[in-house]
Image (cartoon, rainbow, N blue to C red):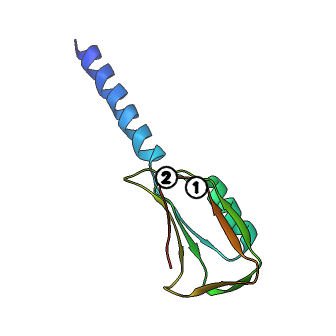
């Protein structure tokens, strides 16, 4: 009986640890178009991608990632209105539960 209880305890511990690891959120600071695209391509629910303040020209970014209702993926500037995209910059958003903030 003790082995059964111990086995259940170990099983539940592993299940909960796996769940915690798989939902861990991350924050990534980027400074280039290539870094942004790489961060987007690797983004998971709850992740936050921060674009360093600056003036950026001719970026072509595709955002196909998928967040969740309770843990959207957020893309935002380092500071409000701290990032300016110019010229032919485009963002193509095809994912879901993505927040792009100013």
Count every numbered label the image shows and give the total.
2
- In this rendering, is residue 36 above or below 18? below
Q: Which residue matches tag 2? A: 67
- Residue found at x 37% / y 53%: 70
Q: Earlier in the sequence, mark 2 or mark 1?
A: 1
Residue 10 location (% of width, % of height): 35, 27
Left or right: where 37 falls relative to 65: right
Q: Quadrant of residue 18?
A: top left
State yes or no: discs 2 and 1 in contact (Cβ < 8 Å).
Answer: yes
**Which residue is rendered at x = 68% and y = 60% of the image?**
62
Provide residue 33's location: percent of width, then percent of height.
73, 71
* Residues at marks 2 and 1, CA–CA distance in whole angstroms: 8 Å
In the rendered view, tell whether residue 81 sits above or below residue 97: below
Vertical side of 74 occupied by 79: above or below: below
Q: Dot 2 lies on which element?
A: loop
Left or right position of 57 against 4: right
Residue 16 at x, y = what percent?
A: 36, 37
Say which residue appears at 33% left-offset and 30% top-offset: 12
Kindly identify which numbered label has been placed on residue 20: none
- Tag of residue 43: 1
**Left or right side of 70 for 1:** left
């Amino acid at each position: 009986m003790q082995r059964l209880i111990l086995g259940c305890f170990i099983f539940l511990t592993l299940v909960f640890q796996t769940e915690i690891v798989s939902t861990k959120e991350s924050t990534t600071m980027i400074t280039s178009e290539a870094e942004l695209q790489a961060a987007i391509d690797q983004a998971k629910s709850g992740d936050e991608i921060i674009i360093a303040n600056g003036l950026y020209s001719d970026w072509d970014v595709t955002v196909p990632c998928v967040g969740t209702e309770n843990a959207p993926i957020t893309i935002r500037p380092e500071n409000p209105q701290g990032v300016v995209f110019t010229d032919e910059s485009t963002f193509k958003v095809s994912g879901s539960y993505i927040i792009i903030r100013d």
